[in-house]
Image: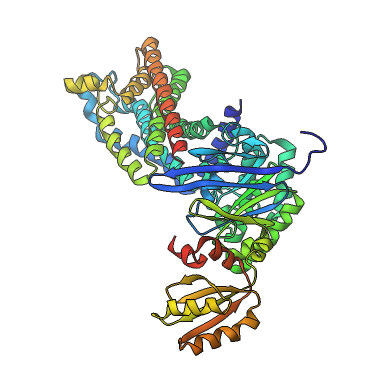
Amino acid sequence: MRLTSPPMDAIVVDELRKRYGDVQALDGVSFAVREGEVFGLLGPNGAGKSTTVRSLVTLTTPDSGSASVAGHDVLREQNAVRRMIGYVPQDSGVDELGTGRENLMLQGRVQGMGGKDLRARTATLLELVGITEAADRIVKTYSGGMRRRLDIALGLVHRPRVLFLDEPTTGLDPEARVVMWEEVSRLAQAESLTILLTTHYLEEADQLADRLAIVSQGKVVVEGTPGELKAGLRGDAVHVEVENGVIDEARRILATVGAAPEQVLEGRTIVSRVENGGRALPGIISALETAGIPVASVSLSRPSLDDVYLHFTGREFASEDRAA
Amino acid sequence: MKTASDTWFMVVRQARNLMREPIWIALILIQPMVWLILYGQLFKNVTKLGGFGTSSYITFLAPAIVVMNAFFGATWSGMSMIYDLDHKIVERFLAAPASRLAIVLSQIVRSALTAAIQALVILLVSLALGVRIHTGVLGWLVIILTAILVNSAFAGISQAIALLTRREATMIAVANFIGLPLLFLSSTMIARAQMPGWMQTAAKFNPVDWGVKAAREVALPGTSWGTVGFYLLLLLLLTAVTSAWATWTFRAYQRSL
């Protein structure tokens, strides 16, 4: 590597495809993650986030496509990749019958570390994730949050360049989740890491990720910073709920007052996007009233990642996540 | 080199986990004694039938109980692999540059180590019960080595089944299915001369019987070292084959991810 290398891409993913039986888990996933950034893969359960990560950490072999992590090809230079990455899987991987320290030491050994260096690194990490007190207790006795911290420490033992966090806060209560967010941001700084995290929490991606990609049905549908994605929607979302049967009439009228419908949810809620919601709302309501259309409810919202998701996939995030 | 050190650290982990289960330690030590004492008493008078090479049934039985115990232990060794698969411990190793071979070998080595410790316990209890191994200390070592080989050979099969089925219930069914038949198709409890002809023939192909023959050969007078070496070699070859099979099933597991 050159001494003054320009910022390079820590992860490059190109057209990954993977099929399990009759499920096309990955259907041409492509994206790139720059060195030093926290990158989020956002999508509902079953969208292909975990399969993407599992391909990048060399656990799963994709059917086609290519990818590199820290400059190494994940298909041809697997051991080089494995030395450069830390992987914190969705469901732990901790040995519950061992202590926190033993788990860390073994992970270090397997990564080729040993002796004084490993002992010191283990102590540093236990301190860093705040479980020094519990270090010599059996993991079975840990709380969910402590176990998650140990998981993350396990991914960091060998000082990786790139850390993969698969659903880091799933299963944690809201309070522990916020603590974990702070932790991840701090670690990214302290260890100058590139982090790829997957999540199905919109606010988590919003909070943590410098940039993110929305994944749906095995594909990346859009990529950008949370700000860019929201700004890309231009304006506020107006949700107008009308009674069944008059939906087409309502759509036509909304179009005439500059609130062209973008989507219809559950057959009776029309979503439109307007430049300035507060100013447009009275006109919208009076136009509908004049036409004699019964309005059940009207709401207005600033752009959120929820809207971004809806805009790019045509589906509501929450309902798709439930369905998965 | 990496395989050897990874295997060692993985064996240490598994052994340490076992040590933390006091009930398991009690079972591991008591169960072989139960075999020895119950069978020893139950069939005490069977030597009168002749062909046992000794009039003391327990002297005839003790080396075979070591082998039987090593065999039974091995049929269960895959359970620990299923635990590690279920808890994603294997995946964590796979995402790191851990030796793939070590993941499988460590299970077999841990299993064989347990069998060796149990063998020693059985021999000590036998000694207390008046059993004298004819070839002395060397005989003890050969019997322990036999236990290690019998256990490794069947642990390879057990690991392969664990990796193919990945289900505890299937493991238990298979262990039960092969356990008792292979025990009764051997000269573990009775002299070969007293077995029906077809069973004698079947026993020739039974690795449990190979182990019993090797262990009993050093325990009773008239030891033929050629016979001992022959059966130990057979067991060694079988261990190589079943370990290779277990490794192959591990690759199949990796491909399924």
In percent of the image, x 50 and y 80: which residue is there? A253
Q: According to the image, what is the colour scheme of the structure? A: rainbow
Q: Quadrant of residue A202?
A: bottom right
| Residue B12 spot, x, y in % from top left | 57, 37
Q: Quadrant of the N terminus of chain A?
A: top right
Judged left or right of residue A160, residue A173 is left
Answer whether residue A170 is visible to the viewer in this image: yes
Judged left or right of residue A116, residue A170 is left
Foreground of the two, B2 or A26: A26
| Residue B123 spot, x, y in % from top left | 42, 29
Tell which residue pokes out farthest to the front in this image: A256
Above or below, A95 against B247 in this view is below
Foreground of the two, A309 or B139: A309
| Residue A131 spot, x, y in % from top left | 67, 56
Answer whether residue B128 is visible to the viewer in this image: no
Above or below, A132 against B200 in this view is below
| Residue B69 spot, x, y in % from top left | 37, 33
Q: Quadrant of residue B130?
A: top left
Above or below, B70 against A136 in this view is above
Q: Quadrant of the C terminus of chain A?
A: bottom left
Judged left or right of residue B7, residue B149 is left
In percent of the image, x 48 and y 35: which residue is there? B107
